[in-house]
Image: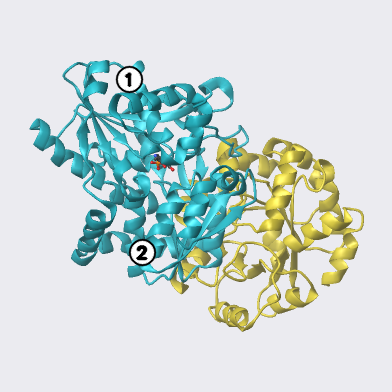
Amino acid sequence: MNRIKQKLQEDKKILSIYFSAGYPNLGDTVKIIQDLEKNGVDLIEIGLPFSDPLADGPTIQESSTAALKNGMNTALLFDQLKDIRKTVSIPLILMGYFNPVLQYGVEEFCAQCEEIGIDGLILPDLPLDVYKEEYEGIFKKHGLINVFLITPQTSDERIKAIDEASEGFIYMVSSASTTGAKQGFGSEQSDYFNRIASMGLNNPQIVGFGISNAETFGQATQKAKGAIIGSAFIKYLTANGVDDISDFVKQIR
Amino acid sequence: MKSYHADERGYYGEFGGAFIPEMLYPNCEELRQNYLGIMEEPSFKEEFHQLLKDYVGRPTPLYFAKRLSEKYNTKIYLKREDLCHTGAHKVNNTIGQILMAKRLGKNRIIAETGAGQHGVATATVCALMGIQCVVYMGEIDIARQAPNVARMKMLGAEVRPATSGSKTLKDATNEAIRDWINNPVDTHYIIGSVVGPHPYPDMVARFQSVISEEMKNQLQEKEGRENPNYVVACVGGGSNAAGAFYHYLDVPEVGIIAVEAAGKGIDSGKSAATSALGKVGIIHGSKTLLMQTQDGQITEPYSISAGLDYPGVGPMHAHLYTSGRGEFISITDDDAMKAGLELCKLEGIIPAIESSHALAIFEDRKFNPDDIVVVNLSGRGDKDLQNYIDYFKL
Ligand SMILES: Cc1ncc(COP(=O)(O)O)c(C=O)c1O
């Protein structure tokens, strides 16, 4: 069974961490993954840096730009990850924008992911209809789960269509915004979290965007299955480097 | 018959579509569901055409350039978009989109700008309608386009610097898109060219299509025929070209010539000639040709003309290029500047440097003496005076 699906069956709240591959240093990718697993993180999203990350706020824009400057690219990331399954068993998701995947070749890209042991992809700018028409077959052939996003503005009808097309989990964007930490969640968020929880969707939901500490993690996972931390972790790496990743994870739970 | 217009899903052949994150879906979907209906409303049409006439100054003349024609031994007409209010064709689109935004109940406008022409055209219509306006502009462009920054401010717009990435037009576009993600309900994004996710390329092309609609009537009057042999326009994102080509796209006997900026030369590494240098990819929500690295990172283009300095082209033009319907020519900085100065001397018209690229094709691209060639003179050169002064040491 796909590692993501297996993990989601565990009776616990899922802590997922995002980082930009190639940041802070080009060669940090494997160490970050290993340390996150060691410290009890449940799922990892490895960010494939892109020159024009239009859904991202300043923190991930900067880490992407720095990673590219460090020399990160798709082929190099695959090379860094080629032996990753010898040391970790945590579910791994690649998250990036569609253009680098298109240039690599979608089929090639998916085949590489399968060979390495990547479990899923999040490509926010690959729309649902195009995925279904052109790429679903390729993703499935290589055992990859494609994760779709929903937002507070997504209509119930579309959420149902996305639920239908999903396997694994739905990425629930916490508010109408780009990525980045906010000042906690308000009533608008709890209404939204409640609304989605009451829809009885097939797929569990994992909340992302704006989760930065134990408090927001707790709020987000009251109803949802888990939560994703990105910008806050990257800020931590910027300030503290990669040596004490356990300190960051302990702050969350 | 094969059509070169967008299909229902916003595709021109394999190009176009809406490759957008879910956060933008409701905005784009609202626009997609409404834009054609709104544009068909009699009250919309009336208000749009009234403003184009009384405020923009349309129809713009179709001027027979006698001395230029004599020099190149063919019949050259200039479509005088340079005489539009604010100095370029950009305002045709911003008038249309501000009326669209009002009908969609939006009370805040955002836009991106490179040279500042689209920013000024947007700030202008926002002042006209009393709507709040925020224009994103790359930090580098703010420094090199000071007069247009001042114009936008005088018109009441807030100019926000884009400080990410390469700090130019593509980054200003990213910032505008991010603003739209963060303000999904009250804000309309006025894109400045036939780029971005569906329905923008088609909507902007329709607003600009007034250019070729007028050309047809004016040619009928002057030459007794609606169709020229060729229409020529410069292409940055491609909106003035889309407007000039629009009513001729599916008329095979009219040749379509798109002119891109070669910068310092196609192979110099400092160029914006997307058709020659680009590959299929996704930029700003559209599948089209764009300049990028082998790894799919979008690269920074170069042209002396800020308005042509975009690493992609609209999906209509990508399709015109790959299908062979359009002839694509690229013109260097030097040849464009020479052609701009030549128009001043021969016809008493100072063109925008963007438009000078279109004028520069006559040196190498020869036409028959009885060919009718319409060049879309997309803008005037006031904004470029400093550039001309520096270049020619005037
Ligand atoms: C005078 C003029 N012509 C052409 C352009 C290029 O834009 P487009 O290709 O969308 O017409 C610009 C853009 O700023 C412009 O100001």
Q: Residue at x 21, y 66 (%)?
A: B43
**For the view shown, which residue lies furthest in the left direction?**
B224
- Please name the residue that numbered disc 1 is placed on: B362
Quick check: B221 left or right of A72? left
Q: Is residue A40 above or below residue B219?
A: below
Q: Residue at x 30, y 43 (%)?
A: B83
For disc 2, the chain is B
Task: Give neighbour class at mark 2: few <14, some 14-19, many 20+ (Cα, 10 Å).
Answer: few
Q: Is residue A178 above or below residue B118?
A: below
Indicate the position of residue B174 as horizontal and vertical percent values. Answer: 56, 52
First in sequence, mark 1 or 2: give its number: 2
Q: Colour of chain A?
A: yellow
Q: Residue at x 67, y 62 (%)?
A: A5
Comparing A132 with A173, the one in front is A173
Residue A230 in view here: no
Q: Residue at x 61, y 78 (%)?
A: A189
- The cyan one among the chains is B
Task: Give neighbour class at mark 1: few <14, some 14-19, many 20+ (Cα, 10 Å).
Answer: some
Indicate the position of residue A98 as horizontal and vertical percent values. Answer: 56, 46
Residue A114 in view here: yes
Q: What secondary structure is marked by label 1?
A: helix
Task: Verify CB contact (< 8 Å) between mark 1 and mark 2.
Answer: no
Measured Cα–Cα span from mark 1 to mark 2:
39 Å
Amino acid at dot 2: Leu
Amino acid at dot 1: Phe
Res B128 label: 2
Quick check: A142 left or right of B36? right
